[in-house]
Image (cartoon, rainbow, N blue to C red):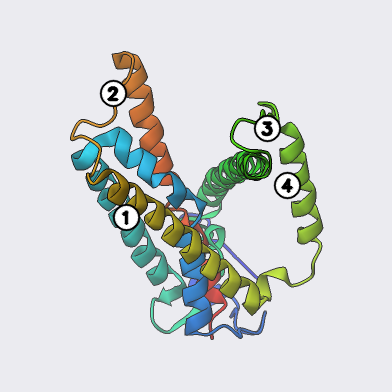
Amino acid sequence: MDIKEDAKSQVITPTETQLRDSVSTRTGTLWTAVTHIITGVIGAGVLSLAWATAELGWIAGPVALIAFAGVTLLSAFLLSDCYRYPDPDNGPLRLNSYAQAVQVYLGKKNEIVCGAVVYINLMGFCIAYTIVTATSIRAIMKSNCYHREGHNATCSYGDNNNYFMLLFGLVQIFMSQIPNFHNMLWLSVVAAIMSFAYSLIGIGLALGKIIEKRQIEGSVRGSPAENRGAKVWLVFQALGNIAFSYPFSIILLEIQDRTH
C-alpha cells in the first residue's frame, strides 16, 4: 500500500492511501464472522473462570467478570468504528489489522509501540495455551490409566510437562504449514462447536456437583488462604485468568476484514 505521512502530525492522510478492496477476495459471511467471534470469545480461558470466581467470592467474582466483559465490548465497538477510514461507514479505506489501524490513526511511532505490546500479549497467550495443553494431555493420560488400571494404580507421569510441550509445539509447526489454513470454513465451525462443547461440559460438571451435595458452595469472601500474602497472590491470579479469557478484541479487525 502506498503510504505517505504528514511531517507534522505523523498521521497518514486518507487522500494518499490506496483502497484495500482489491488486495484480497473477501468470501466471509455473517455466519463465518459469528463462528470466529464465538471461537475467540469462548476460548480455553473460560475453563478457569470457575476457579477464579471461587477465589474472588460471589460478589467480587461476578463483578470482575462483568467489568472485563464491558471493557471487551467497548473495545469491540471502538475497533469496529476504526475498520473503515476516514468514514466509519463508507470508508473508503479498509484497515485489515490492529497495527494498521494504529498506524493510520496515530502514526508510525505509536504503531511500533502498540505492535510490541500486541506481540508480547500474543506471546503470553501462546505460552499459556502451551502450558494448559501440556497439563491437559497429562491429565487425560492419568485419567485413562485410572479407568484402565483402577484408582489404586500409581499412574505417575511425572511433574515435568516438557515432553508434552514439545509434542504440542511440533503439532503447531506442522499445522502452520497448511496453506490458507485461516480460510477454512469447516475449521471455524469445528472450533466453535468445541468451544460450546467444553463450556457445556463445565456447566454439566458443576450442576452434577450441586445435585450431588445439594448445596451451592463458595463464600462471599472467596476461598481461604494460608496468609494474607497468599490471598493477594491468588486474587491477582484469578483476575489474570479472567482477563485471559477475553482475548477477542485483538483479532476483531481481522475477522471484520474477511467479511464482504
Q: Secondary structure at mark 2?
A: loop
Type of amino acid at the residue the image marks with label 3: Cys
Q: Residue 85 at x, y = what percent?
A: 45, 74
In the figure, 38 relative to 221: above or below?
A: below
Left or right of 60, for residue 183? right
Q: How many numbered marks have been drawn onto this rendered protein structure?
A: 4
Type of amino acid at the residue the image marks with label 2: Pro
What separation in Å lies between label 4 and label 2 (alpha carbons)?
35 Å
Of label 4 and label 2, which has the lower sequence position? 4
Q: Are marks 1 and 2 in contact (CB under 8 Å)?
A: no
Q: Residue 101 at x, y = what percent?
A: 50, 63
Q: Quadrant of the image for the N terminus?
A: bottom right
Q: Which residue is mark 2?
A: 224
Between circles 1 and 3, the one closer to the viewer is: 3
Q: Which residue is mark 3?
A: 155
**Image quadrant assignment for residue 257:** bottom right
Q: Nearer the viewer, residue 32 or 48?
A: 48
What separation in Å lies between label 1 and label 3 (alpha carbons)?
40 Å
In the figure, 121 relative to 223: above or below?
A: below
What separation in Å lies between label 4 and label 3 (alpha carbons)?
21 Å
Q: Name the residue at 43% across, 51% down.
A: 46
Q: Residue 127 at x, y = what percent?
A: 62, 40
Of label 1 and label 2, which has the lower sequence position? 1
Q: Which residue is mark 1?
A: 69
Category of crowding for the residue at label 3, using alpha-carbon neighbours closer than 10 angstroms: few (below 14), some (14–19), many (at least 20): some
Q: Name the residue at 60% across, 78% down.
A: 20
Category of crowding for the residue at label 1, using alpha-carbon neighbours closer than 10 angstroms: few (below 14), some (14–19), many (at least 20): some
Of label 4 and label 3, which has the lower sequence position? 3
Q: Quadrant of the image for the C terminus?
A: bottom right
Residue 30 visible to the viewer: yes
